[in-house]
Amino acid sequence: MVALRSDGGEMDLSVPENIAAFFEIYKVYGKFLEYYSTRAKEAFIAGLIVVQACVAGAFLVMSFTSVQIPLAVIAYIILDTALALWMVFDILKSSAQINDRDKQLRTACMKISAPLLLLPDPSASQLRQARAFGAIASYLEHESVISANLFGARITKELAVRVVAHFFSPRAFLRIQGWFGTTSRAMRFLGSFWSSLKMRSLASSLRPFGNRRSTREMRLYWGSYGKTSDPASSPLALLPLPPPASPDAPPRTLIMTGTTGFVGSLLLRDILEHRRRFNVGKILLLSRPKRGKTAASRYDAFFDPTPMPNADPFSLLGDVISREEFQNIVTVLEGDVLEPGFGLSEADSELLAAQTGDISVIHAAAAVSFTQPLVDAAASNITAALKMQELAKGLGGKYVHFSTAFVHGNNLTEADAPLRETLFNIDLAKHDPQKLYESMVNGSGLAPEAQRAYGFPNTYCFSKCVCEHLLTARSSETPTLILRPAIVGPSCASPYRGWAGSRASTLVAGALLYLKSRMSAWHLPDNIVPVIPVDVVTRFALVKIFAAEETPEKNIFNVVWGVGSHPSALFTWQRFSEMTIQLGAVSDMYSRFTGLLTQHLFTVLVTRQNVEGDLAKFMFYHRWISRMPFEGKIKLLELTGYSAAAARLKKMDSFVDLPVLFFNFTRSNFYFQSDLVAPSHAFDGAEYMTLCGLAGKNFLEKTAFTHTTIAGSAHKTKELIKDLPVPLPTDLLWAVSNPQGNIWIRLVGYILTKILRLTTTSVEVDLESFSELMVHIADERRIAPDGEGERHHIILAPTHRSLYDFLLLSYVCFTVPELGMDLPHICAANDFASLPILGHVAAGCRAFFIRRGGGRDPALKKSLEVIKTKSKSGAFLEVFVEGTRSRDRRFVRPKTGFLRSLVASGGKHTLVPISISYEKTPEQASFAGENRIGPKSGLGGGDGLLDWVVKVVRGKVRLGRVRIAASSPIAFSDKSNVEHSVRLLQQLQSKRVCVSAYHIAAAAQCLDITPDLLTRALGDAGAEMWEGACSPPPTPPTTKSESWSVALQCLHHFAPLLESPEWSSWLFASAPSSAAPASPAMTAVANALSAAFENAERGAQAAVDTLVGKGFNACELSAEHVLGYYDCAYPPAPLRNNGIKLVIGRLGNKAVEVVAEREEGEEPPAPGPDEEAFGAWGFADSKFVLTDKKTVMMQSSRYKIGGQPLPKLIPFLEEELGVSIDVAHEKLPPPRPTTKMRVHASALVDAQRERLSSVVAEISYDDRVRIRHGFGHAQSDIAAIRAVDVTARVPDAVCYPSNETECQGLIDLARAVGLVLLPFGGGTNVAQMLLCPTHEQEPRPIISVDMSRMCRVLWVDQVNGLARVEAGITGRALNEALLQYGVTMGHEPDSFEFSTLGGWVATKASGMKKNRYGNIEDIVREVSVLSAGGGPLWQHHAPGTSRDAFGRVACGVELKDLVIGSEGNFGLIVDATIRVSALPAVSEFDSVLLHSWSDGVAFMRDLAGAGANKPVSVRLVDNEQFRLGQVLKGGGGGVVSALQKMLVTRGRGFEPKEMVAVTLKLEGSADEVALQKKNVKASARRFAGMVAGASSGEAGYNLTYAIAYLRDFGLSFGLVAESFETFVNFSNLSVMVAGVKAAVREEHRARGIAGVALVSARVTQLYSEGACVYFYYMMDGSGLKNPSAVFDEIEATARATILELGGSVSHHHGIGKHRARVLEEASGAGFKEAVRAVKDSLDPGNVFGARNGLCGGGGGGGQ
Ligand SMILES: Cc1cc2nc3c(=O)[nH]c(=O)nc-3n(C[C@H](O)[C@H](O)[C@H](O)COP(=O)(O)OP(=O)(O)OC[C@H]3O[C@@H](n4cnc5c(N)ncnc54)[C@H](O)[C@@H]3O)c2cc1C
């Protein structure tokens, strides 16, 4: 056996080493190889690319929503997708095609020695395939390393590789290079650039952007900028001041230059501050006039306060000396050092010359310019210094000179050979310093030659070096002190942290330039920055100038951190650049992508080019990446007419080349000998670096760095490419380049950016509070006092006002990774999971779903454990303690269940209160429109969202500002009191809720007070205010109710002041009990609030009074009910709702807890197979149940709908009925098996019982059995049984005859002893046919004759298509039996599982498939009837012959016609001969959608014309039922269903609240079904319908079986529902349906019933002349004394309207007692007589005394 290698070679596996090697390697590559080892997997890759193209397409669509021009995006996507496709197809090609040019790839492939296929004899194609896999494997191995960094661990490596790799693939580059066939320098450069952008290096360079250290830096350093620090704990403490001068010593005189400059001015300040200590008597400042200002007035500015971002205004000298004293001590001499006699006036010259005593001349003036010609450099850096030294000499003083640390030519040093504090070693013989100086002044060649020879990078350093030599040469005459600072940076401590003088210099200027223009001035390598804070320099100078003892042997000092300093005191150029970029990105100056790009361009790429020391090489790159693009950009702007932008850019020209000038300082590490050695922790280099950046930022904008704007229209996006006329998908790039997050988070981040920009003005983050929090958390985690390894979980608990909340916190983490917050796992309610598309996205964005209010959820514990164990140090979880969104911005009662589960699942926890404040919430208007009380509508489906998105895109959504702030964390453990913790949490949340003018205006209007008063009151209450006005302002509230919800944003502050505790806790559930003393303004607001609340209660009371006046039971009124009668003159929702709740609560509304209602006792035994439910429709093993507060599920294994959660059902019913369903309280549940039913006893005495037993073997006197046989299945029947106390009369006994003899015996006995017989089939009728006549109507005992034992199929005649079947057989049993013979009866009423053949005949039933098989009258050919008058009746029997049947006959009046519809009045039907048909060859479902009910009716009418060629069943449902059908489909429908929905509503223009559906069943031969389909299509086309497919058809058809179960589920919660049907001609159909619906609604309203009537219609059976129409009506019976009876009364009204508008009394439900009166009134007298005559003749003793229909004499039932 051989193993095939990727390079085509073979590996002999008989060699043991090879086998070991094979397995070793296979382990590594196995995953890839498995993955790609079949064609199908290859297709998978291609599929991924398609997905990627779709994602790209989605991005494109999104880009249309932005203001950016999408053209660039299109180009980008096309290129991107093309590249992706090309890459994949290329990879899938065999490696044989790898051509010579791809040498690098080939080499990579060869390296892989993994055996790819283990085959005994590989075929040629397998060989090729193996090679291809080798290529893939090599490719993947090469690229896989880059994947995880980009998309996070949740995406599989493979997926990430496929989707992402091509973006920055070096292989792609190599290909391109191959095309060009070139290896030019430019191409190499491009290649290197390209590969530098590989994600791995990108990710690594991103690291400093997102690590936890950044948080600490943000908090400690960014927050510390501008603060003064205690010198004792600052680096200045390293330099203790010399001892004070002796009091006897003469006062010192200082003559200073350069005191308006950066170093000089601080030195002046320091000297003045310590003037007494050092006995400084006089200071003469030699200064030049400048820009029209005299020298003296230039010092005025040092007393002017300048604004400080984080502190009080600051003035440089004002806090160390008064202006008067300054003027006493300091004399400003106006002149110029370079001028003869220093350019002083005569008087000043004399003054200067007159100085005596202890004199120091300090020359701090310098021109730090690297581009000066030698002659100028000599003047400013040498001549001036020599003249000042000369002055000191003349006055007998000492001279202090400021040189530079960079006076050592090109000497590169090592740590063990640092730059010493001695003169630079120049060859004095060759280069005498004096001669060099002269050469510089007269322009001879000596100086330039020397500068070159010693490698001085600029004239500045060279001239400083020469100067040092000259000064030292003269130092024997004048004591000379030379101080050599390195790069001087801002202060580290004094006068405040980050002080940088009046002009930005060096590092600060670098940061400023970058922040301002994103034009990097620094091509910065990873070398240490030789910087020293200015206050360290001046302190050092102070120490040396005022030193008690002179150290003549050493007069030169390096003022820079010397060798031996702790590494923590240092930082590198690259780190500095990263920090600056980070600073700009976080403070919203440009996007992170821009930062990233520029960082790569300027710091990573160039430093990779090995340019060390090679200025020419460096300049080459500089030209390519800085100068040329800069000039190109200006050209482009000019050409395209953006001249202003071009002009702006041109101003930056002089800065472009700074990198070259600074090359010398950045190119290598410098090591200095110095007295300044920073020990560990004395000086924090990272902090100092940050101060440099912040100082730069402060020159740009003097704002405190406490907040940042992360999104919104005001969010500035100053991009590198901003000025270019070509827009780029910057948001997309931003989303991709952020350091954390998977593909979903990036996608959502991208979309959210766009949405927030379009909807909000700004989304602000209180960075200070978050960074404080994160530092706290980091400390906590570090301490870990409770044992090692215990994870510490952070529970972020935001306020919950909007769906935005779910994303905003994650958005903050994503946008500001410096915070070091992991993207949280968001705890969301199950409803989210079922949202189409959004549910998936939410899960991708780390949401996990919980059952709300459903008690203990084991699944939750499990998901929490998984989440918790995933993260090493502990998880970040986001939880909304209020549960659902607070619809009116109140602080509603927090929930504790989730937190308890959280603690139970282990680990340490910290609760973090987060406040998310909105000026306007997106949901505000719709929330205010929700008038209901109690459970609110769900999240809304895709439709609402789409509409909202459309509004957003049109710019119609203006929400104003959003602010996110954190409060102090709360430690939370299993020992914590959960209630107390959540209260505290809510109180902390409430404090940071921000109030704006928008809220104040709304609140003032609602309370009828002035905005000023409210503002004052809020100020007194300590509310956090939103400063300034928002532009554009949020759209104002349009309704009073909306105004109130806006007002409540700020009114919780007054909750503790309210007298009513109920209202106080309504407003703010966790309001602190003891309020601080209230100001008059606060009291005034609280009073106004109380008045509004009282008014709301008054309104509620008035509504209750009205309803009581209408006859309702006050203590049973529901809140919604009262709501319907609440006068709008009183305060609106949300006050109204609470007013109603309080008033109703006081009435003592007695809803009974389900638990209390349930009886104690053992669990009932499981129902037997096919056992019927008692007190409910259907099988005992099937019923609707609640799985949690909102979700309903059908518990059943019989029906397809069984087991599916139906989360939308309750919300749908609530929405349609306009009530909230109190699912916590069952009002009328079915009796449990153990419930003792109460009913009258059987009237049969023992003797009668004995007689009965003599004729029938099986008899029951059981109460439950008797009750069951006394009712059918209408809602009134079910309600009567559920009452438990059954007041109606029920049969005295139930007999189960099993044959005709027993039946006849019973009839004979009944006649003989005076019994009444009620035939009983399945007991499914809905017309009160089984209701017993009252004792007054019928004094004889009543026996129910249950036919269920007579259920045999007697014979089946397949030749003639006939079967004779006993009457007690159910439809279900009959179907099964006939199936054995390959035939069907085809009669399927919705009740067919329980109804019987006898019942069908007796009620004249109609089945779903009547179009093909006919109604019962078409199916039944003969019947056998046992009558009480004439004995057994058989129409065609000849004496002694069998009861063979014919077919159609014309033999006068037929027996079957007499008993069809006889409703048990004429006799006992014992069997029937029925028509049977062969099973259909094809049976299919289909469905059609139509735009409106009228279209639907027209379609039905049209299809009716198809005669026999129409589907076997055609049902049209109206919009209400259509929507109910959708709801009953369960779940969220998933992505496919959401897309389908979108296609139907958006694509085909179907209005969701108008459209109707037709469900179809097609049966017959293939040709017949094809013809039926054709007819359906044709009709659909005629009425603009859409054929919607089999699954909807099947779902609709099967749903019918669930409807009765649902009706009885509703009854448990007080919802009364029933159907009633009619036949109507087509001409009257539409008018009748509209009329009946209107009549029912009106009757419902007029009776004051709660909510609105849910009334809907469906057309079920089609005839050429008309159709059968079913109505469904549902009402909330709350508060009614007898809801069932009221329902029947309303149905009677509906029936009257039906008759009035052309409908019949019934189509198939029959008459019974329910419609007897209506039929009585509708029938002619003669006919009635005839019917009664037939009855008398067949049953002279009225044994069958059911009194149904016309045989009841109009008495009995409800109508
Ligand atoms: C959920 C549901 C769906 C329904 N769907 C349909 C439908 O699609 N189409 C339809 O037509 N109806 C429907 N009905 C109504 C009902 O199912 C029918 O009226 C059915 O025909 C009644 O049959 P049964 O066997 O249950 O009769 P029962 O309810 O037991 O009795 C009905 C009447 O027939 C008499 N009777 C019963 N058996 C005999 C017998 N052997 N000899 C003499 N008299 C007898 C009884 O005395 C009584 O008066 C539905 C009812 C429900 C609850």
Image: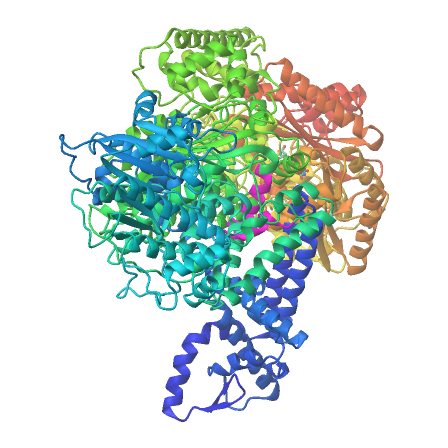
Residue 1050 appears left or right of 960: left
- In this view of the protein, which residue sits in the foreground, 834 or 1620? 834
The residue at the point 46 percent across, 59 percent down is: 439
Residue 1305: x %, y % from top left: 57, 39
Which quadrant of the render holds ligand 1? Answer: top right
Of 1098 and 1008, nearer the camera is 1008
Quarter holding the C terminus? top right
The prevailing secondary structure element of the residues shown in magenta is helix
Relative image position of residue 1175 (x, y in whole percent): 50, 33
In the displayed structure, does residue 1132 sit left or right of residue 560? right
Residue 467 visible in image? yes
Residue 421, image quadrant:
bottom left
Whether 164 is among the magenta residues is no
Q: Report if residue 729 lies within the magenta region.
A: yes
Q: Residue at x 19, y 49 (%)?
A: 787
Q: Residue 1069: horizontal and vertical position, in percent?
A: 38, 22
Q: Which residues are magenta?
A: 728-756
Vertical position of residue 863 compared to residue 621: above or below:
above
Name above or below for residue 1401 compared with residue 629: above
